[in-house]
Image (tube, rainbow, N blue to C red):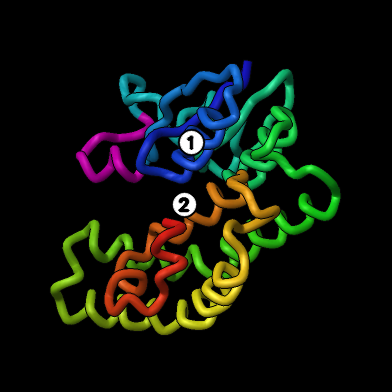
Amino acid sequence: MITLYGMYRSRATRNIWAATELGLDWRLKPVIQAYRLEAQGIDPAHPEAPFNTRTPEFLKLSPAGAIPVMEDAGLVLSESLAINLYMAKKAGGPLAPKDLREEAQMLQWALYGATAIESPALDISFAYARGEAATENGEAKIAAATAQLQRPFKALETHLAAHSHMVGGRFTVADINMAEIVRYAPGPRRADGAIPASERLA
């Protein structure tokens, strides 16, 4: 059985989604981020603190102290996009790459999403989540992140204008990975309808 360490409202969401779609035998072991506990005035290192990203047991699995982590028959894997690709190949079927070509394309889009889209998209998501969007500083953060996203979203729009899905003309783990990255950026996606394909993906 696959064990996923993490929680909803984190990058583990994409692994939970993929594992469910793939029909794998899996379970979720909740791990809360230490910063969430600190925000509530709870010391993550306290013996009675909930299982969290600074708990020694978790740090043995993830020295970086980050979720998600997957454990499967002795294999410990971090990085949510890599976990999804692993689970898809393990399960096989239409969500998985059918050959080396598709695997390379799925890896390409996972890396592109992680390096070109996710960081500025998260800046926007956090600005909204923290109630900063209506402040001068928050508006500046969102504007700067939106500007960074113009080029990668244009590339994504161009691809989706010519293809029904990210890879292989069908719903795959590549769509899960990219959708879970794109959805972090509500501002650029919904402001003027300029990127409808990305909005549909999300």
User: What is the x, y in percent for residue 121?
Assistant: 41, 66
Q: Is residue 27 shown above or below 15?
A: above
Asked whether residue 60 is in view, the answer is no
Q: Is residue 39 magenta?
A: yes
Which residue is pictured at 34% across the width and 45% down the height? 35
Q: How many marks?
A: 2
Task: Give yes or no for contact between labels 2 and 1 (Cβ–Cβ under 8 Å).
Answer: yes
Residue identified by numbered label 1? 17
Residue identified by numbered label 2? 180
Q: Quadrant of the C terminus?
A: bottom left
Which residue is pictured at 36% across the width and 21% down the height? 47
Q: Secondary structure at mark 2?
A: helix
User: Magenta residues, as a range?
Assistant: 35-45
Relative side of 45 to 129, left or right: right
Q: Secondary structure at mark 1?
A: helix
Which residue is pictured at 70% across the width and 28% down the height? 91
Give the residue type that dot 1 points to.
Trp
Give the residue type that dot 2 points to.
Glu
Query: What whole-number distance in Å separates the C-alpha atoms at marks 2 and 1?
Result: 10 Å
Residue extending furthest toward the right: 100
Q: Nearer the viewer, residue 108 or 123?
A: 108
